[in-house]
Image (cartoon, helix red, strand yellow):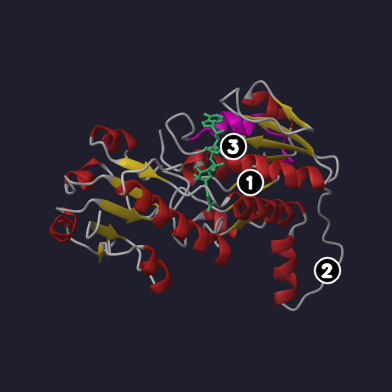
């Protein structure tokens, strides 16, 4: 491993650089690099450190025939072709150290939509004052969590503290139970009962547009949809129609199908929609922990050791 060529899509500062020992580290600006630049940087790389903005598809992996370890500074891996990586015997690792930060932001979005906080801030910022801006209590309301994994479970723990009735739907029957959380047998059953639906699935072929027109039609017209997973989980066009036609109460979105959205994106102009710029993990502590975790994952793999954050 000493001197192993490693390519990074993020610039590392001295505390992180010290963790790398004597790797031959090269920074590459993947957004602006030509294929030739990428090829030059990757041709002998053994390790690759990326964030979720870099698409690690088979074409990119082909440029790195010596690659052994691909470490992403994210928990989601939908930007990586895992099949191509496996065929090339590249170990892929991720950073499941952000569940609390994303769960906190999810509760923030739930409160923003239910208590109309975006509207309230706008009223005051525009010189107004309206103490009759009525929202909705969370107490006793039904929250459906779709995807009961690491983040979904943290959201459940918080929502129970708000005295909500928490239901969960997950494709995997064996995912861990939490006392007080009711499992629903089908997504449609859960959607029909929920006052708030919060999405926490990973983006995969079974979850792309999981929330489509039919799913939205199953929801109560007063319900709120919260998405801190990936934009592609929701059919955004169908969501827009449901909101325009008052078939849904509102939405709180940290992720969109296209990021950043164009200025003409209709969701941005809707009073009952809150859009955040994909900041689920964006705290100082969590982003630092993610980077440290990703570097440690890469070092572990390059040493030929088993990494606890390697994907099967
Ligand atoms: P996880 O793997 O622990 O949980 C995902 C759950 O979804 C799993 O339990 C899985 O069984 C379930 N699932 C998969 N397909 C399903 C389907 N078709 N129907 C029902 N359930 C299904 O992942 P996690 O750590 O909880 O993260 C979830 C996702 O959150 C990530 O993959 C990422 O896309 C997203 N995320 C977003 C941000 C942000 O900044 N907004 C930050 C971190 C993660």
**Most foreground residue, 276 or 289:** 289
The dot on residue 130 is 2
Which quadrant is home to the C terminus? top left
Residue contact at pointers 2 and 1, CB within 8 angstroms: no
Above or below — where is 48 with respect to 174? below
Q: Secondary structure at mark 1?
A: strand
Q: Quadrant of residue 77?
A: top left
At 20% from the left and 53% from the top, the residue drawn is: 45
* Callout 2: CB less than 8 Å from ligand 1: no
Above or below — where is 185 with respect to 16? above
Give the farthest residue toward the bottom: 127
Residue 217: % across, % down: 63, 31
Which residue is under mark 1?
226
* Callout 3: CB less than 8 Å from ligand 1: yes
Majority SS type along the magenta span: loop
Residue 152: % across, % down: 63, 40
Which residue is under mark 3?
149
Q: Secondary structure at mark 3?
A: loop
| Left or right of 307 in this view: 5 | left
Q: Which segment did they paint magenta?
A: 209-223
**Chain-order first, disc 2 or disc 1:** 2
- Circle 2 Cα neighbour tier, 10 Å, few/some/many (<14 / 14–19 / ≥20): few
- Circle 1 Cα neighbour tier, 10 Å, few/some/many (<14 / 14–19 / ≥20): many
């Amino acid at each position: 491993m000493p001197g192993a060529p490693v390519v990074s899509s993020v610039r590392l500062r001295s505390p992180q650089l010290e963790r790398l020992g004597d790797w031959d580290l090269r920074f590459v600006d993947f957004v602006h690099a030509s294929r030739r630049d990428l090829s030059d940087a990757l041709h002998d790389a053994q390790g690759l450190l990326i964030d979720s903005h870099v698409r690690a598809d088979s074409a990119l992996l082909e440029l790195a025939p010596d690659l052994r370890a691909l470490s992403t500074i994210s928990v989601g891996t939908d930007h990586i072709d895992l099949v191509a990586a496996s065929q090339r015997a590249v170990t892929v690792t991720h950073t499941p150290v952000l569940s609390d930060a994303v769960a906190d932001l999810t509760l923030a979005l739930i409160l923003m939509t239910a208590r109309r906080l975006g509207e309230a801030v706008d009223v005051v910022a525009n010189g107004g004052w309206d103490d009759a801006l009525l929202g909705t209590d969370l107490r006793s309301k039904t929250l459906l969590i779709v995807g009961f994994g690491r983040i979904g479970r943290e959201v459940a723990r918080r929502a129970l503290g708000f005295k909500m009735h928490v239901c969960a739907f997950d494709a995997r029957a064996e995912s861990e139970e939490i006392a007080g959380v009711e499992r629903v047998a089908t997504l449609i059953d859960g959607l029909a009962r929920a006052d708030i639906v919060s999405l926490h699935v990973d983006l995969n072929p079974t979850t792309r547009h999981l929330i489509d027109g039919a799913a939205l039609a199953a929801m109560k017209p007063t319900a709120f949809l919260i998405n801190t997973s990936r934009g592609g989980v929701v059919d955004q066009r169908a969501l827009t129609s449901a909101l325009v036609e008052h078939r849904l109460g509102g939405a709180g979105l940290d992720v969109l199908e296209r990021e950043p959205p164009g200025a003409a994106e209709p969701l941005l102009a809707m009073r009952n929609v809150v859009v955040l710029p994909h900041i689920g993990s964006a705290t100082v502590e969590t982003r630092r922990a993610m980077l440290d975790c990703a570097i440690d994952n890469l070092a572990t793999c390059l040493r030929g050791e088993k990494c606890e954050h390697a994907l099967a």
